[in-house]
Image: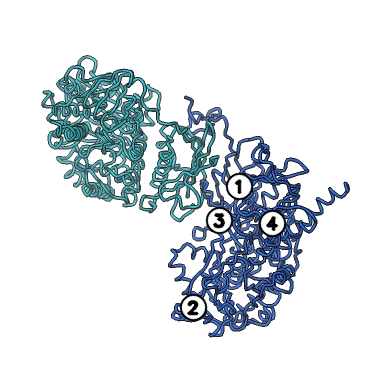
Chain colours: A cyan, B blue
Amino acid sequence: MAPRVQSLDLANTSKVYYAPATITQGNNSRLIHVSGQVGTAPNGTVPADCESQIHLALLHLRKLLLAAGAAIQDIAKLTLYIVDYDPAQRKHARPIQRFLKGHRPAITLVPVTQLAAPGLLFEVDAVIACPENVPVSLPSSPTSQANPEAFDVAIIGAGLAGLTAAHEVLRAGLSCVVLEARDRVGGKTWSQPLAGGQGIAEMGAAWINDVNQTKMIALARRYNLELIEQNTTGNCVLQSFDGKASTFPYGELPKAKLTKGSFFIQFDQVTSEGVARIRDMCEADCQALDTFTPRSTALDAMTFEAYLRSRDASETSLATATVWTRAMLGVEPSDMSALFFLNYCRSGGGLLQMRSDRQGGGQHLRIRQGTQSIAQGLAADLPAGMLRLNRPVQRVLQDGPSYVDVVDAEGAGYRVRKVITTVPSPALSNISFTPKLHPAKEAWSQSAGYGFYTKAIVVFKTPFWIAKGFCGLAQSFVGPASVVRDTSSPADDKHALTCFMSGIPGQAWAALPEPERNEKLLEQLAILYSDRATVDRNFVEVLKYDWVGDQWAGYGCPCASLTPGVLDMLGSASLREPLGNLHFAGTETAGDWKGYMEGAVRSGERAAKEVVSGLSSSVLPHL
Amino acid sequence: MAPRVQSLDLANTSKVYYAPATITQGNNSRLIHVSGQVGTAPNGTVPADCESQIHLALLHLRKLLLAAGAAIQDIAKLTLYIVDYDPAQRKHARPIQRFLKGHRPAITLVPVTQLAAPGLLFEVDAVIACPENVPVSLPSSPTSQANPEAFDVAIIGAGLAGLTAAHEVLRAGLSCVVLEARDRVGGKTWSQPLAGGQGIAEMGAAWINDVNQTKMIALARRYNLELIEQNTTGNCVLQSFDGKASTFPYGELPKAKLTKGSFFIQFDQVTSEGVARIRDMCEADCQALDTFTPRSTALDAMTFEAYLRSRDASETSLATATVWTRAMLGVEPSDMSALFFLNYCRSGGGLLQMRSDRQGGGQHLRIRQGTQSIAQGLAADLPAGMLRLNRPVQRVLQDGPSYVDVVDAEGAGYRVRKVITTVPSPALSNISFTPKLHPAKEAWSQSAGYGFYTKAIVVFKTPFWIAKGFCGLAQSFVGPASVVRDTSSPADDKHALTCFMSGIPGQAWAALPEPERNEKLLEQLAILYSDRATVDRNFVEVLKYDWVGDQWAGYGCPCASLTPGVLDMLGSASLREPLGNLHFAGTETAGDWKGYMEGAVRSGERAAKEVVSGLSSSVLPHL
């Protein structure tokens, strides 16, 4: 008879007198009891702050889940042990809530004075319902019954990455099918026409530039799209801790500008210098990283907030950095690894360039017809029948080295030689892979998480802010919008401010009843640019789209970020690495301009090149 | 498919991101959730030290396991709560590791500032996988099929206890079969011939005396065995904390000798008096105990170490006492109940007598032909066919009051009226008993544990230590050998030092690679007695046997010891008490000379008397 309790081990744990986890046997239910997990980095060190330790401990818990074939949803109970617990802060709640992704296990919190080893500030143990060891059922129907269509390549997703890849694959003389879950192309680019023909509102990605986003500018030109330069003429606004707004002129170049301190004119000299020092430090540290394969156990063991605090960032510097992370990823500095964020900045040429609205910056040019026009153009240029909308892929089966079976939600089957998935890693769980994704890929997919990020496009009758000498750019320490940008299209008589409702204040705002949401937003815009009467008099409508509710994006936007420890544990290349005949694209897999449209296109090209090269090497010898 | 974990909500809890409780689904598995167990003695008192509390709390946990019909292997999770936790000490690790006996559940350690009641320093709770309620399967084959042989008595084990019992049973006119698991007789007496005919090496028990070991000396004489008096002429050696050796003459009587302090001549006056005080206190306390039924809730609630510390033992006194427990039982003073150890000493006439190499002491006489000769003699004197080697007993089935079915590993059955088991209690788990052993017996068997104990017999060409004025006796605070004794046989031209590799230093030594083990040992012998050149020049070979790997001994030697609380809870007689027609012998069941060959013989006589008397009383009325 098998023992009723079996130890479940990771590498190197089997010599210890207790197991990291155990499995209880039963006919229909098994529970996993997890030993206390603590926040050690892969090199055995322990970061100095509690939140970084929490992220690392949860990463260890995730590894145990993976080892057991279990998911977050299988967690029955968590017990949290916290040293120096401060009930006024409850810093554990946010990372744990993010980790759970909506799953609601039982939780007990136990403040303690110390843990098993000096320096430990957090420990978590868990009870997990273990999935049955169901033998992998090989594909029966519908693939084997339904005479699958045959192609060289199947591409999952008709966003910029997928459509780019499709064109590259076609160009190499291979056949291809593009399977899109939505009823439209474009993925996270989605341009909605405004009422009355007054141009479009970008619900998703909006900006490109013509300096270092060579792929996107070429596509814009190929489809004869009109470019709108981001307005940086006039004053910017900063809404500070006290909710009050002050103005400052948009400088010639963010870096030069910022160096003079004028961006932070409302700060005193010391505060201003402190912010400049932190900004320059982040810039220098991100420039020191490799774009494709960043490496630093130290930076990856801590959150971006812990990194900033360890470098004596002032509260104002922290608030400034928080505006960055909210506007760029929808997350708080405590939500992600310092290494991840710095590398993310690096991918856009650096913090300053990525955040700039000027030439070469991340927010320099908009597309009058909407960014989705590019995906629509690429789709229209594909041979008929190649693109299949409303076809969410359900299963990807690699039975052997020579082909892959893909099955969509309608039961249609596709037998192909290569698959490129452009699905964002948090959305990979929509697809059943056989064999299962490699543990590293699984760990990455499960660890990657979006922040809270909603754009509210507020349309006005007139650009009253221009009349008042504002360029439209504002940032706020208090919200609800963290950043506001002018997204008008004068040629369309469209006057709009796009408000980035991100991170904690954005989430709080989204939880309000609908009427209050508009009210709060208009109130903030009045503080930033004008008076309430002017705002109300000009107000037309608010457009917004809740990416948090979007299944195919993986419930978020614009790009998933990683908590501490993941990059270091898995290696930064593991998300891009193919598994057999399965290749991975999408903007988050990009080196340059990760999270941007440019990154998506480049990732599609890169994956297509892998596929073409792989198929060529196997085909050419026979020619 | 229903989710494996469902949230269980109370009114108003469903908006919170965690649930107050969860339910895991399952049909057939049951879990035992154990309340926090604390270290209370049977009278409700709590010992002052943490380790004693740990042992007692684990004993309470064991009782719960027994009550549930579960075993150590069924523990899924332990949570340890420790007051005044010191990460530099981790004192919990050793007792818990010993308790678990290699099983590896998940464990979380929670340092706390206090527990539910004042004075509590340790608490443990547990999750245990509950065994199925399988109805006891009554014996079918092979017993019922195989025409079992019929005897009055089956004796399990052909060591000194079993062979003695066999002779007594025969003497009473009853029939008998002796079932031995090994391919030899003698149990923990095992005399291996040396190469070149130079006598034997005792891998197991070695010493007897002719004063108070009346049974053994009679057997030795019955088989015409030659006795070798232990050499006590010359100096002894003490290797102290610093690893340096100093000498002292072996006194006339240990007690007189020690009283003069000369035994500890290298200690200063205060140290020496302290050691003498502790030794005299142990002697007095053990003499105050009853040999067969020792009783003291206070002494049994604490470890021997806690007992010594509570009496202000100095570090030197503790180290001295540690040499005793290592050499006598292979355990540390923190591993066992003070009552158990003091009673163990009492069983040999007291600490001083048990430890003495002089007349009447525990190590006075050796047997030139080897102690195993006695078992061999007893076996040869049995009627042919009565002794069955290589017959490990697998099952003992008491179906009713009149007979017992015994089944061996070959499937052979024996239907008998009485069974005597001489199996050491840690090895009782090799046998399946139906009905199960009484909970008290189970608790004893599970609580009894060996320490680490290996004898390394180092053979030399000449007794160079004699030439240097040593008697051969040495003790060491640092190891690897804790005690060394001369085990030469001049008549055989055999010159040997037997090194007791016990407790923590012995275990550390055993973990070394083989070549390093000899190296360390020879190095220590050079320090103790001579110089390295002399040792190397005289070295012939090392013989040793790993009792820790011996299944039939219960993985240890010479005698199992008990943690705090067991004797007091179960009563000291419970190990000897028969269960129906099943009787218990073996040296650990002895009153006098527990753990020695003398105790084994006496236990065999006692069990045989029980059996003969039981069978006679049921038979005689019919005559």
Mark in the foreground, 3 or 1: 1
Q: Which is more toward the observer, A258 or B452?
A: B452
What is the three-letter code of the residue carrying label 4? Ala
**Distance of label 2 from label 4 (alpha carbons):** 52 Å
The image shows residue A208 at horizontal and vertical percentages of: 17, 32
Q: Which is more toward the observer, A462 or B99?
A: B99
Residue A343 sits above or below residue B231 on the image: above
Q: In the rendered image, which residue does mark 3 sit on?
A: B92
Q: In the rendered image, which residue does mark 2 sit on?
A: B527
Q: What element carries label 1?
A: loop
Count residues near mark 3 (Cα–Cα under 10 Å), then give few for <14, some for 14-19, many for 20+. some
The image shows residue A59 at horizontal and vertical percentages of: 39, 43
Mark in the foreground, 2 or 1: 1
To the question of a shared chain for discs 3 and 2, the answer is yes
In terms of sequence position, does the residue under pointer 3 or pointer 2 come before the other? Answer: 3
Q: In which quarter of the image is residue B197?
A: bottom right
Q: In the rendered image, which residue does mark 4 sit on?
A: B384
Mark in the foreground, 4 or 3: 4
**Distance of label 4 from label 3 (alpha carbons):** 53 Å
In terms of sequence position, does the residue under pointer 4 or pointer 1 come before the other? Answer: 4
What is the three-letter code of the residue carrying label 1? Ala
**Distance of label 3 from label 1 (alpha carbons):** 39 Å
What is the three-letter code of the residue carrying label 3? His
